Amino acid sequence: MLDVVIIGAGIAGCTAAVYAARNRMDYLLVSDNFGGQFLESGMILNYPGVIQTDGFKFRSAFEKQLEFNGVQRLIGPHIKKIESIENGFRLIGDRQEFETQTVIIATGSHPRKLNVPGEDSFLNRGVTYCSVCDGPLFADKIIAIIGGGNSALEGIHFTHRIAKKIYLINIEDHFSAHAYLSETIASFENVEVIDKARTFEIFGDDFVQGLRYEREGKQYQLDVHGIIIEIGRTPNTDFLKGFVELDEKKHVVIDCQSRTSVEGVFAAGDCASGLEYQYVIAAGQGCIALLKAARYLSNRRDF
């Protein structure tokens, strides 16, 4: 039986694995793929100690760090279920099973998509899903932020001093965000709200040039240099239903020590409650989760 199995090889899972290796634990890093959110990121300008990089380079640097620390990783098995067993847990994958005393869930999340033509082809070429991460890339540019909830309006608050002009494209005729966010939008002179607008196409050449939307039966074209889609994210936690407590948006509920509702199970990163999708937060939570799992094991062995 292993000390810990870490599910997910994004920044939270990889951070936990580095700490597990350095603590000489009997562990395994298991994931469908390697990289997590790295695979979707464009430029990265806000990670402490790294002036400028991108998702591909950051992923490569992390891979080298894993190799340097001799991290044991198993890329491929898809974990479908976790069961409680005597003294630990059984992880049931599509090809293998693992038994472990503790589990760290770091399965991340994925952005909700518009599912319109041009969305995938212009990813990282003007289309992004994170205002805080990528807003600075559009300094003095004309952009569109799509959405009407907290994520979109927080994006407006973050980018209105960065972008030259922002169009907020909202499919509803009202905002579904906190009142304090909605009330201040009108005071931003460079923000124009277009409500009851359904985006149906993103177009461009080598880079995004604009979008097309439908409003009250008529079609319109909007020329912009960037498009930030902020209609929420979905945590990758379907396999955990009935095993640990999930919040209303399916995030794993954790406390300040990354502990879940099940003793011996921890969670970190975008799949966990907190709703702040940032690399630095995911890395910190991955570290906390591993250290608390190690403390949990040490306390068990003392009895």
Image: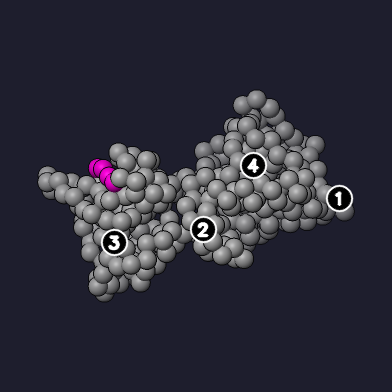
The residue nearer to you, when weighing 58 against 249, is 58
Measured in 3D between alpha carbons, the distance from the residue under mark 4 to the one under mark 2, in whole angstroms, is 24 Å
Nearer to us: label 3 or label 1 = 3
Of callouts 4 and 3, the N-terminal one? 4
Measured in 3D between alpha carbons, the distance from the residue under mark 3 to the one under mark 1, in whole angstroms, is 59 Å
Residue 52 vertical placement versus 262 (above, below): below
Q: Residues within 10 Å of mark 4 (few under 14, many from 20)?
A: many
Nearer to us: label 2 or label 1 = 2
What secondary structure characterizes most of the magenta part?
strand
Could you tell me which quadrant the N terminus lies in? Answer: top right
Q: Name the spot of residue 262 as percent of width and height, x first.
A: 65, 47
- Badge 2 is on which residue? 44
Q: Which mark is residue 142?
A: 3
Residue at point 69%, 48% (across, down): 64
Q: Residues within 10 Å of mark 1 (few under 14, many from 20)?
A: few
Residue at point 26%, 60% (across, down): 167
Of callouts 3 and 1, the N-terminal one? 3
Of callouts 4 and 2, the N-terminal one? 4
Hey, which quadrant is residue 241 in on the image? Answer: top right
- Could you tell me which secondary element the residue under label 2 belongs to? strand
Of callouts 2 and 1, the N-terminal one? 2
What amino acid does circle 1 point to?
A: Arg
- Badge 4 is on which residue? 7
Look at the image and give the residue range highlighted in magenta: 200-204
Measured in 3D between alpha carbons, the distance from the residue under mark 4 to the one under mark 1, in whole angstroms, is 24 Å
Of callouts 2 and 3, the N-terminal one? 2
